[in-house]
Amino acid sequence: MVIQLQILFTQKHSGEAVICELIKGENMKVSVVMTTYNGIRFLKEMLDSLKNQTRKIDEVIICDDRSTDNTVKFINEYIEVYNLKNWKITVNHQNLGWEKNFLNALNSANNDIIYPCDQDDVWHLDKIEKMTAAFEKNDNIWLLSSGFHSFCENGGIPEIQNPVPTETAEIVSRVVFNEKYYQILRPGCTMAFKKELLPLFVKNWKPGTPHDAVLWTIAALLRKLYIYDDTLIEYRRHDSNASNEIIHGYKYRVNAINRTIIINNWYLNSEYFDENKLQIVQNCTNWCDYRYKLIVEKKPFYWFKLFRYRKYYLNLRKYFGDIYYFFKSK
């Protein structure tokens, strides 16, 4: 990694003092991590948008989960035709499922910044350039998420881009830490993160848990979660999206409760713990515990107790949704 230091001197006219400010810029290397499974329909658009990035990608890792169509053949031919020596595809020995496949793929990344990538989206050609420059200018960014434009094909479910509260109106700004810190407000395909975040993610990830939700929550707790307020990806929604399996339903709700408790408990006992966040994090854990007792253990009294923690819901509709899942079976 090349480190360049630029020293700016500003001297007061009175001759009192000289203020020296060090600005650090880093030439950081980039890994793009893609998982594939029977993705031949949309694959060329995604690969083209990676190949044509205005900033060169240092490493592209593709992990295929035993596709039964021509996905692997197409990717190998694409790599050969365009002589993409820094691109590599591996095929799993058995089908692992999209979550485990993504976990293994992320662990294969070697560079400073990791960009998770879906097989069916289209990236704006300056996405890598813009987001990587933001990392290089601000050491405190560990996870950066951009805006997206969602479009639907073949029965896809539209994805709503929820507003994200930030500390400033600048194009790159830190996300406000509040009671909704656990709530993921951008999909994983819009994210990039420093490799330092990876071991913390691995420690807190459990089967059945979306990788982006874990990354977002940890970065929020560490106060290293930032938004790039520009649309840098075309987010394709269709009938075969892997995320369609987890967005709605009883299991997803219970998983969200459990993963938040796990991450909160880790944080409270970690070297990163900040006492200023203690009350919010403890209250969030209590809120999750009450929700579990209502939805899983079917104890209706806890719905009334949850009203005290209503600020932790993304909106009141989610609060009333919990009572719906009290009555709904698994």
Image (cartoon, rainbow, N blue to C red):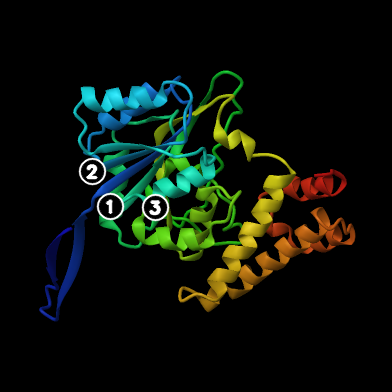
Residues at circles 1 and 2 in contact by the CB criterion of under 8 Å: yes
At a point 46% along the width and 66% down the height, the residue shown is 222
Give residue 150's position: percent from left, percent from top.
51, 29
Local packing at callout 2 (Cα closer than 10 Å; few below 14, some 14-19, many 20+) is some
Local packing at callout 3 (Cα closer than 10 Å; few below 14, some 14-19, many 20+) is few
Q: Mark 3 points at which residue?
A: 107
Give residue 110's position: percent from left, percent from top.
29, 52
Q: What residue type is labelled 3?
A: Asn
Q: What residue type is labelled 2?
A: Asp
Element type at marker 1? loop
Image mark for residue 248: none
239 w.r.t. 321: above or below: above
- Front: mark 2 or 3: 3
Residue 45 visible, this angle: no
Q: Name the residue under label 2.
A: 58
Q: Name the residue under label 1.
A: 111
48 w.r.t. 90: above or below: above
Q: Distance between the residues labelled 2 and 3?
A: 16 Å
Element type at marker 2? loop
Q: Quadrant of the N terminus?
A: bottom left
Give residue 320's position: percent from left, percent from top.
80, 47
Give residue 149's position: percent from left, percent from top.
47, 31
Residue 248 appears in which quarter of the rendering? top right
Q: What residue type is labelled 1?
A: Asn
Element type at marker 3? helix
**In the image: residue 120, left or right of residue 26:** right
Q: Which of 45 and 86 is in front in this view?
A: 86
Q: Distance between the residues labelled 1 and 3?
A: 11 Å
Mark sitting earlier along the chain (1/2):
2
